[in-house]
Image (spheres, helix red, strand yellow):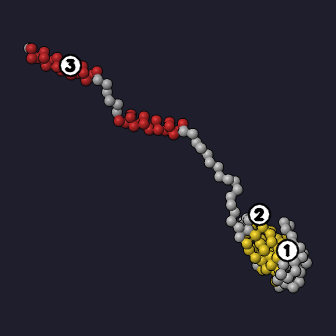
Amino acid sequence: MKKAITIFAIISLFLLIVGCTPQVPKLENNLQNTVQQEEDKLNNQKTTVVQEPLEKTIESSTQIVEIKGFAFVPQTITLKVGDTVVWKQKDSAPHTVTGDEFSSQRLSKGEDFVYTFTAPGTYDYLCSVHPSMRGTVVVK
């Protein structure tokens, strides 16, 4: 009987110890808590906004239009905003380059007219001396 009481006491003591020991949290709960903590950290971080300058450097190029044979050659050209056109007068008769946005003086042979296009659009022009001479600049 003493043996049975001793075994009963040992089993009772074992159950008492196991029952009073705090349980280890499950791994899944730990993982959820860690994820939530990291999300909270991210949500509480300050955000820095970096603004780029509004004006960007415009790479420009120059295109040539020859005035010869009572015509603008080429008759139509396409440019980018910021590009420049140089009209080179090669005729013996005087000519102008006249549009709504720009106008040259009367050009003699060997003279040039230069204009830089700063806005997109279609620009029609003509020679005010010879109105049948027409040209177009398309700026994209």
What is the x, y in percent for residue 33? 42, 34
Cβ–Cβ below 8 Å for labels 1 and 2? Answer: no
Query: Could you give the CA–CA distance between mark 3 and mark 2, rounded to whole angstroms?
Result: 92 Å
Circle nearer the viewer, 3 or 2 = 2
Q: Is residue 26 left or right of residue 122?
A: left
Q: Residue at x 76, y 70 (%)?
A: 84
Q: Quadrant of the C terminus?
A: bottom right
Q: Quadrant of residue 58?
A: bottom right
Mark linked to residue 13: 3
Counting other residues with Cα less than 10 Å from the Cα at mark 3, is it few (<14), some (14-19), or many (20 or more)? Answer: few
Q: Amino acid at mark 2?
A: Thr
What is the x, y in percent for residue 108? 87, 80
Q: Is residue 135 left or right of residue 128?
A: left
Q: Amino acid at mark 1?
A: Val
Query: Could you give the CA–CA distance between mark 3 and mark 1, rounded to whole angstroms?
Result: 109 Å
Circle nearer the viewer, 3 or 1 = 1
The residue tagged with tag 1: helix, strand or loop? loop
What is the x, y in percent for residue 43? 53, 38
**Which of the marked residues, 3 or 1, is nearer the chain's N terminus?**
3
**Which of the marked residues, 1 or 2, is nearer the chain's N terminus?**
1
Extreme residue in the right direction: 129
Q: Is 37 placed above or below 20 here?
A: below
What is the x, y in percent for residue 119? 76, 62
Mark linked to residue 118: 2
Q: Residue at x 73, y 68 (%)?
A: 83
**Which of the marked residues, 3 or 2, is nearer the chain's N terminus?**
3
| Residue linked to disc 1 | 97
